Image (cartoon, rainbow, N blue to C red):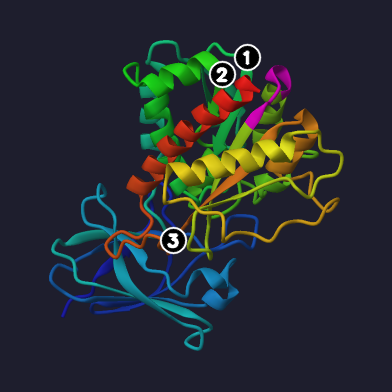
Amino acid sequence: MTNIAIHSAFDSGNIELRRIEGAAAWLLIPPDHGSNFRQWFHFGVTGGKGRELVLKIGDLNASAYPGGWPGYNACVSEDRQIWTRAASSFDAGEDNGTLTIRFTPDSDVCWFAYFAPFSLERHMELVARSASAPGVSHRVLGRTLDGRPLDCLEMGEGETQVWLFARQHPGESMAEWWMEGALDMLTDPSDPVARSLRQKARFHIVPNCNPDGSFRGHLRTNAVGTNLNREWHEPTMDKSPEIVAIRAAMDETGVDFAMDVHGDEAIPHVFLAGFEGMAGLKSGQQDGYDRFSAILAAQTPDFQTRHGYPRTPAGRGNPAMATNQLAMRFGAVSMTLEMPFKDHDDMPDPLQAWSPERSILLGQSCMRALHLWLDGRHAG
């Protein structure tokens, strides 16, 4: 029987082949360049039509987040349009932690990924589509270490300065699917909520803060292995020019409301993380955060407030993280939105688990919640 073939030399591809025997393969996840973070995988398989593929990714006890593997099913697609889940199991005792993926494709070509990829080509299409909408302007905030532009889309006439940004951690591709949902809604001239939002606020939207890491197939870092969400206090041009550029643009406009969009490897829920650990908060900041959280919970059953990160004790917040820095620097109501790589346990979906489609819908729900939040803020 002929061997299948595995390849990953493409946008966001990342896997290391150890050996192949027929329709079975033994694999490793390479780390992000210049760092020890490794969790993201994305690869193609050819020659598997009608055969049960058995794909074993080993050494996962040494991955960035070993807690992300139990209960996780790998993403799979045969057309790169619809991503479903392949039955997967994790054995911590096999080969220092092994995820075994089983899938029988109907085609000779299929792809597997940690989450449905959001390619740089799709990013450029999203930017172009959004920038061509009435009332939308585009500017490049700066350049990455690999020379890529940091795209920022701006719209709205209101005085409230809203910043939305995603993919500081490039492997968290659900964050840019969220951006697609939010941007398509905000630029829809027939949507009355979007029209009202643009009247109430000025939006500054960075759909991808880390295009270098996205293209390189990194989980968490940029071209030189820097975790951008630990650079907000003292960013530098040699390690984190992305944050230098974004923070400088924020200094120009000010920030009243900010949402930093992410994905979480281990927690099978959608949740928010705030800035409660920062000292010297202004009156009303925490109330504003709590009010948005309550509004969003009423907007969609895909968001909940019971599960999430432990609250940071007062005075122990890390100013190098975006949400904390923006709360401290601008007195903003800032927050980190987390979506799961696994399923959403409150409303599980056995076919897709958490998916691009649900990320898109959540982006739209967040914009509707923001509309109600702004109404209450202006009324107050």
Q: Which of 52 and 155 lies nearest the eye of the viewer?
A: 155
Please tell me whether residue 67 is drawn above or below residue 310 in the rendered image: below
Name the residue located 41 percent from the left edge and 54 percent from the top edge: 13
Q: Earlier in the sequence, mark 1 or mark 2?
A: 1
Q: Which of 316 and 320 lies nearest the eye of the viewer?
A: 316
Q: Secondary structure at mark 2?
A: strand
The residue that label 1 is drawn on is 159
Image location of residue 376, percent across then percent down: 59, 27
State left or right for residue 294 relative to residue 177: right
The numbered dot on residue 41 is: 3
Name the residue located 76 percent from the left edge and 31 percent from the top edge: 331
Identified by mark 3, the residue type is Phe
Image location of residue 58, percent across then percent down: 47, 77
Q: Secondary structure at mark 1?
A: loop
Write down the region rendered in magenta: 251-257
Q: Earlier in the sequence, mark 3 or mark 2?
A: 3
The quarter of the picture where the C terminus appears is top right
Gap between marks 1 and 2 measured at Cα: 6 Å
Gap between marks 3 and 2 measured at Cα: 38 Å
Q: Earlier in the sequence, mark 3 or mark 1?
A: 3
Residue 240 shows in the view:
no
The numbered dot on residue 201 is: 2
Q: Are marks 1 and 2 in contact (CB under 8 Å)?
A: yes
Please tell me whether residue 255 is drawn above or below residue 340 in the rendered image: above
